[in-house]
Amino acid sequence: MPEYKLIYFPLYGRAEPIRMMLTHAMADWEDFHVGEKTIPWPELKMKMPYPHQLPVLELADGTQLTQSTAIARFVARKFGYYPEDALLAARCDEFIDNTYNEDKVFAKVLKPLFAPEEAKEQAVKECFEEALPEFMKRVEPFLKDEGFLFGDKPTMPDFFMASFYFSVMDNPRTKFGVEDGQWAKFREANPKLVAFAARFKAEMGDYIDKRFEANF
């Protein structure tokens, strides 16, 4: 049995920063995808600590952890991606809460994926004209010419940022903004973000190119 078993749907979603950290750390872990080929969600969900909620990280002794940011912080502490300095750790938490856990940014960018057809056009407009400019305003001060967000080595916020980027902003399977070139224009307009992503991708070896395909 692996030391860690990450249970989530066959999506990147809120599990991807955790997957990236476990992969980068070369941890002993299993990426368990809920579905027809494993265990159907209706059968599994009542066995989870909080029904209807994933991801769940299961430890070798059977302990189960929930809530994606809490799981990520646990993994980050285990493998050295969470600063020991209390102030820097708070800055890392602040960054994630101000972007990934902020409804004005993350949820609004993803809104077109879940909007009904009649509301999708407006949701896409809000994504590119409101949510993404707000996102860049919040992250731009942390994007450097070299290194990562909080130093010369990746910390927890780098995995969240890269997950957001490679799961949505630079994912050929994203269900909006790809065919009409809106994501390409966004990337062209933000070279420092693209450069950060390239440095992170190099840090991850071939993980991003070889991972399973998903819409987000």
Image: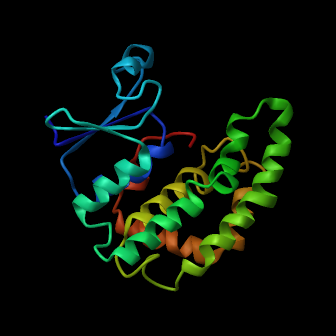
Horizontal placement of 4 versus 162: left or right? left
Q: Residue at x 58, y 63 (%)?
A: 98
Residue 33 in the image, given as x and y percentages of width and height? 37, 31
Give the residue at the far top of this rendering.
Answer: 43
Q: Residue at x 39, y 26 (%)?
A: 34
Residue 73 in the image, given as x and y percentages of width and height? 35, 56
Considering depth in this image, is 24 or 126 the residue closer to the camera? Answer: 126
Considering depth in this image, is 178 or 31 the residue closer to the camera? Answer: 31
Q: Quadrant of residue 119?
A: top right
Q: Residue 179, can we see it?
A: yes
Does 36 appear above or below 186? above
* Numbered circles on residues, count: 0
Q: Residue at x 47, y 59 (%)?
A: 160
Q: In the rendered view, how is the structure colored?
A: rainbow
Does 206 appear above or below 116? below
Quadrant of the image containing the C terminus: top right
Residue 197 in the image, given as x and y percentages of width and height? 51, 68
Considering depth in this image, is 143 or 49 the residue closer to the camera? Answer: 49
Residue 170 in the image, given as x and y percentages of width and height? 59, 56
Does 92 appear above or below 11? below
